[in-house]
Image: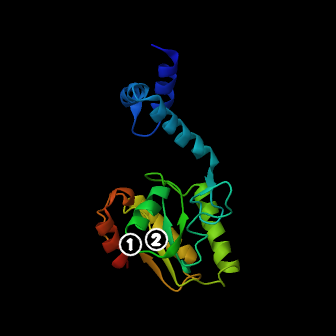
Amino acid sequence: MLSPIQRFIDVFSKLPSLGPRFATRLAFYIVNQEKSKREELIAALTLLNNVNRCERCFFLKMDTETLCDICGDKKRNTKKIAIVEKETDILSIERSHSWNGHYLVLGSLPEHGILETEHKLRLSKLKTRISTELGGNIDELVIALNPTTFGDFVASVINEEFKQLTKNITRIGRGIPTGGEIEFADEETLKSALDRRI
């Protein structure tokens, strides 16, 4: 097989949910596109080199910006913060148009076990931000983690650590089934879950 094709398959088959069979189909699909379409794809992938993490919430931002679009938006309520697991959870919640606060991306949680160093570091940065930038107290902290057994455990840890720093700690309502993922919920389900947070 041509080495560029094999190289593509080797790299893309390591991505989540792809595998060698899908990577092979994708390689041949791209090769059979017009040159302008391939160049458009290459340009889109190259632009990802300019993406970095927001130092405030750990969402994504362009290298040229100090903060992400959400943290930099003056119209958003800084006294309301939702803790989510993944960046895709933010995109899903934003599509529901039912949250005008800020976020903290905690990072992917293992299926069981303990919080990793990076999770603890991000929670510590949020505590510091609340204490120094936000007057030591916020109006609401929404724990918007996936409703899994470990997600529930992490929520209880966060609840304990932040109870002195917020007037109200809530969890998104159970519009999302236990074991489900926020990323795959439709807008109406997320809107309902946020409206019925407890």
- Dot 1 falls on a residue whose secondary structure is loop
How many other residues sit within 10 Å of disc 2, few (<14), some (14-19) or many (≥20)? many
- Describe residue 150's horizontal placement relative to residue 74 as left or right: left
Q: How is the rendered protein coloured?
A: rainbow
Which amino acid lies under the numbered mark 2 shown in the image of this protein? Ile
Mark 1, Cα crowd under 10 Å, few <14 / some 14-19 / many 20+, is many
Q: Residue furthest top?
A: 1
Residue at the (44%, 74%) spot, across then down: 99
| Residue under label 1 | 172
Locate the N terminus by quadrant.
top left
- Whether pointer 1 and pointer 2 mark residues with C-beta atoms closer than 8 Å, the reply is yes
> Can residue 150 be seen by looking at this rendering?
yes
Quadrant position of residue 79: bottom right
Residue furthest to the right: 132
Of pointers 1 and 2, the one earlier in the residue sequence: 2
Q: Callout 1, which amino acid?
A: Ile
Q: Is residue 79 above or below residue 16?
A: below
Q: Position of residue 48 (x, y in %)?
A: 58, 45
**Marks 1/2: CA–CA distance:** 7 Å
Q: Quadrant of the C terminus?
A: bottom left
Does residue 144 sit above or below 32 in this rendering? Answer: below
Q: Position of residue 90 (x, y in %)?
A: 46, 63
Which residue carries the number 2 mark? 143
